[in-house]
Structure formats: C-alpha cells, structure tokens
Amino acid sequence: MGVGPIKAILSLLVLVSIMGMPYVVLMPIFATQVLKGDARTFGFLMAASGIGALAGAVYLASKKTIRGLCRHIAMASAIFGLALIIFALSKSIALSLVVIPFVGFGMIVHAASSNTVLQTIVDDNKRGRVMSFYAMSFIGMLPFGSLLAGILAAKIGAQNTLMIGGISCVLGSAAFARNLPLLRKAIRPIYMKMGIIPEVRSAVEAATELAMPPED
C-alpha cells in the first residue's frame, strides 16, 4: 500500500472540499446579488454545473485504464479552481453559464479519480478504513467549508471568498502536480504487481502460459 500517495490524494481532497466545494452554498448570492437574477437564474446555474459533472462522469467512464489518473487529479482540481475564479469575477449570466459547467466537470473528475486510485492502491484488508478517510475528507469537510465560506462572505463578500477558494485549489493542484514523479514512483510497483502496466501484464501472461502443463 502506498502511504505517501494516499496522504497526498486525501490532503488535496480536503483542501478542495473546504475551499472550493462551498461554492454551492454561495450560489444563491451570485444568482441574485452578483448576476442580478432570480430563482430561475439559480436553477440554470445549478443545472449547468450538473451538466458539467455529467460530462466528467462520462469522460472518466470512457477511459479504458486507470493509468494517468493521478495526472487527472491534478488537472481536474486546477480546472475546478480556475473555473471558480472566473465565475467569481463574472457579472454576466451568459459567461457564468459557460464557466460553471467546468466547475462541475472538475469537481466530479477530481473526486472520482481520487476514489479510483485510492481503491486500487490500497490493500484489500485496509480498503474500508481508507475509504472511510476518503468519505471524511470529501463529505465530512463540507460543513466546515460551508461555515468558513459563510463567515468570509459576510466579511469580504461572496466574490472574494470564492476567488480565495479557487486560488487555493489551483495552488493545491500545483503542489500535487509537483510531487507527481514521486507519487508515480511509489504507485508503479503496485501497478506492476497487479499487472496494470501493459508490458508487465504481457510478461506475466507469457510466464503463466509457459508454466501451464501441455494439454494432452
């Protein structure tokens, strides 16, 4: 089990959950006060975010291998953060509706990729414990993030609060990406053992065939 990659993935997940995910609780403020809309504006924004999340799920479902998902974790959290920054600065409903799907896309790709990598690299007898940490990092941190977002929004405004959250996600993504070589080095032996790396899998299959007794 790669302890280093698990810590890195969960740490980024906690950061995104606390600093970025509370955009949902701030959305009514953006719909009414920033974009000068109404309940329909709020509905359109949430629907656009959902469309982006659906696109992210379809994108991940189309992947045939889990290799490269650590890079997707860094990429998705960066997309999530950048989209939040642009959305926070936008005062146009049209631009906001174009940007907010990328928020949903980045959110679901980051969360699902993290989940998949964690479940792959963890030992079978520790999977339940690690996934409980995943749930705590992803869902358990949301109330604290929402509380922090509410306090900051009351003091510095919803737009500045969301910008700080987006910048934090981008910085966290950059730190994660910088450590990707070390994470790959730690994960590679696990993938080799599981036969996920193609050339290793081929060698294992060939060795298995040679070891099998000939058929009568």
Image (cartoon, helix red, strand yellow):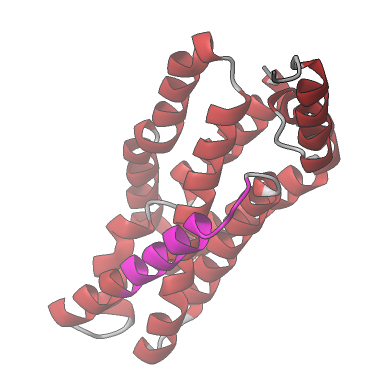
Residue 209 on image: x %, y %: 77, 25
Give whichever of 14, 113 is nearer the camera: 113
Against 83, residue 211 (above or below) is: above
**Residue depicted at 70% across the width and 49% down the height:** 68
Q: Is residue 177 above or below residue 14?
A: below
In terms of depth relative to the viewer, which is nearer, 33 or 98? 98
Q: From which residue to which does the magenta span run?
A: 48-65
Main secondary structure found in the magenta portion: helix
The C terminus, quarter of image: top right
Residue 107 image point, x, y percent: 46, 55
Which of 146 and 61 lies nearest the eye of the viewer? 61
Q: Number of labelled discs? A: 0
Q: How far across and down, in percent of the image, does residue 191 sit?
A: 73, 30
The answer to whether residue 1 of the structure is visible from this angle is yes
In which quadrant will I find the N terminus? top right
The residue sitting at 38% across, 59% down in the picture is 23
Left or right: where 9 falls relative to 184: left
Left or right of 89, for residue 52: left
Quarter occupied by residue 35 = bottom left
The reply, left or right, for residue 12 in relation to residue 112 is right
- Magenta-colored stretch includes residue 58: yes
Instruction: Identify the residue shown where x is 44% and y is 83%.
Output: 98
Q: Does residue 129 belong to the magenta stretch?
A: no
Q: Is residue 157 visible?
A: no
Q: Residue furthest left?
A: 39
Q: Is residue 70 above or below residue 59?
A: above
User: Compared to 84, does 77 lie above or below?
Assistant: above
Q: Residue at x 59, y 64 (%)?
A: 79
